[in-house]
Image (cartoon, rainbow, N blue to C red):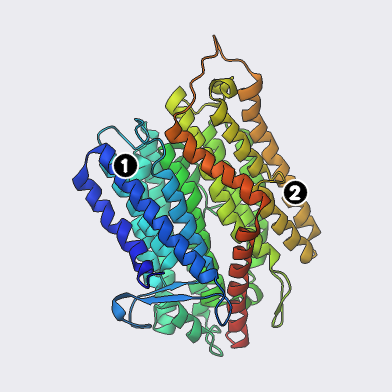
Amino acid sequence: MNPHTPAFLIVLPLMAAPLCLFLRKKSVVRVFASAVALICACFAWQILLHVITPGESGTRVIRYAMGGWGMPMGIEYYIDTANAFVLFIVAGIGAVVMPFGMGCKGLAGPEGQQHLFYAALLLCMTGLLGIAITGDAFNVFVFLEITSLSTYALVSMGTGRRALTAAYNYLIMGTIGGTFILVGVGFVYAMTGSLNIMDIKTILAEPGALASPTAAVAFGFLLVGTSIKLAVFPLYQWLPNAYSFAPSKVSAFLSATATKVSYYVLLRIIFTVFGAAFVFNVIGLQNLLLPLSLVAMFVGSLAAIYQTNLKRLLAYSSIAQVGYMTLGLCLIVIDGNTVHNYDGLTGGIVHLFNHALMKCGLFLVVGAIVFRLGTTTVEEMRGLAYRMPWTFAAFVVGGLSLIGVPGTVGFVSKWYLVLGALAGDQYLVAALILISSLLAVFYVWKVVEVGYFQKPDGDIVKTEAPLSMLIPIWILMIGSVVLGIAAEFTTSTATYAAENLIRSGIGMMIGGGS
């Protein structure tokens, strides 16, 4: 791997975004943006392979000093297994979404503004990659703002006035979340005099460093701000409208990446900055987050059952899936200097990848349906399985994965979460995971019933989606099945990430920070 690959991963899409404004011609811009996303995916894959390759002391860590300025003075990129996994998710999803529907009209914002659409999408990808790769707390906020500003523009490019309303609501909630994060970073800087995350960790690990009330206040601000971005229940109000009224390519990209990066930030705050001992033994985060996660799993699924708009159905399903991810955080058991349970956190981390695959594919299916039928209303999709057989078959595969049927990636995630609950003697939580999974049967079956068992008005005319749509969709759906059967790579990577994160949290406890 080239030693400057971490920098290339950020600089390439950042420089490519304004170039889209000069290229302007939509066919050229689409090819250019797709090529950039593919190159970024290759860079992210190289980084992931590098960090999971065993070194002298286990998995490797990449520390890249921007401009040669070392920590704590300079800006550092710090990459371990956890954020390398997230980098690959963001770049990989971008490589699939960018070329989706190439040559088809109406998928990249208003006609004549495709160059603006792809510039904003590349900026959004840059921001998400930057959040995941940076080792500087203030730069997390900077990249977060790059992501947010581009996302507001992308959501507003949806058809209809409600897209503008959704973008405005997202802007308000996103601004509040970003402000909370910035204030939290300010409190951390006041405590430590540093913005480098690893330097902050070292300072806060000193005896008595976390005894100050400022530590609890700082953690509270960071937790609330990140929870808004992650759409943790009940701070999810921005998500349903943003996903429902944005262009389908935007919904697919955001659902697969934005909440995943926010979850990574939450992991980094808990385990690297403050430490597991302080967060769980002193603050008692699990006492709040566990019930909220369980409620999210049921509220999101129940709300999805009653939706008549397919994109809105998938949006509420995402709220439930976020509940599964945050639940994994609450299942670790710390006793003294020993952690008894890695499975729950492993399940939460592997669900980052698994949910990205299936939900991105499902939103791309909706994009194909809108392209052919011009509707997202479930009732107007009668007989869709006969009109668009390959597209609807992809929806069925993705739906089975949402349910958690064995042989799909959704089963792998929920299996680890159940193992984590059982290992912590939380049998009721394990039962609730299974029951909430069954709720997904109802909203998936509602769409399957309309597509397979209800006849459309008039003759059935086959209007299958073009190959430029089917290929990206089926890449994701085949991945959902293959990685559901042969899950060793994703689960082992998630396990490495969980072990490294928890080990860093335990290290702070030994340091006497709490």
On screen, residue 237 above or below 227: above
At numbered mark 2, what does the secondary structure look like: helix, strand or loop? Answer: helix
On the picture, is 248 further left or further right than 277? left
On screen, residue 137 above or below 352: below
Q: Which residue is mark 1?
A: 30
Residue 154 visible in this rendered orientation of the protein? yes
User: Which residue is nearer to you in this view: 145 or 338?
Assistant: 338
Residue 180 visible in this rendered orientation of the protein? no
Residue at x-position 37% and y-position 52%: 37
Q: Residue 251 sits in which quadrant?
A: top left
Say what amino acid the circle numbered 2 marks.
Answer: Leu
User: Which residue is nearer to you in this view: 45 or 167?
Assistant: 45
Q: Which residue is mark 2?
A: 434
Q: Position of residue 76 (x, y in %)?
A: 38, 75
In what quadrant of the picture does the N terminus appear?
bottom left
On the picture, is 502 further left or further right than 181? right
Q: Residue furthest bottom?
A: 207
Residue at x-position 37% and y-position 62%: 9
Q: Residues within 10 Å of mark 2 (few under 14, many from 20)?
A: some
Q: Residues within 10 Å of mark 1 (few under 14, many from 20)?
A: many
Say what amino acid the circle numbered 1 marks.
Answer: Arg
Q: Residue 53 sits in which quadrant?
A: bottom right
On screen, residue 327 above or below 79: above
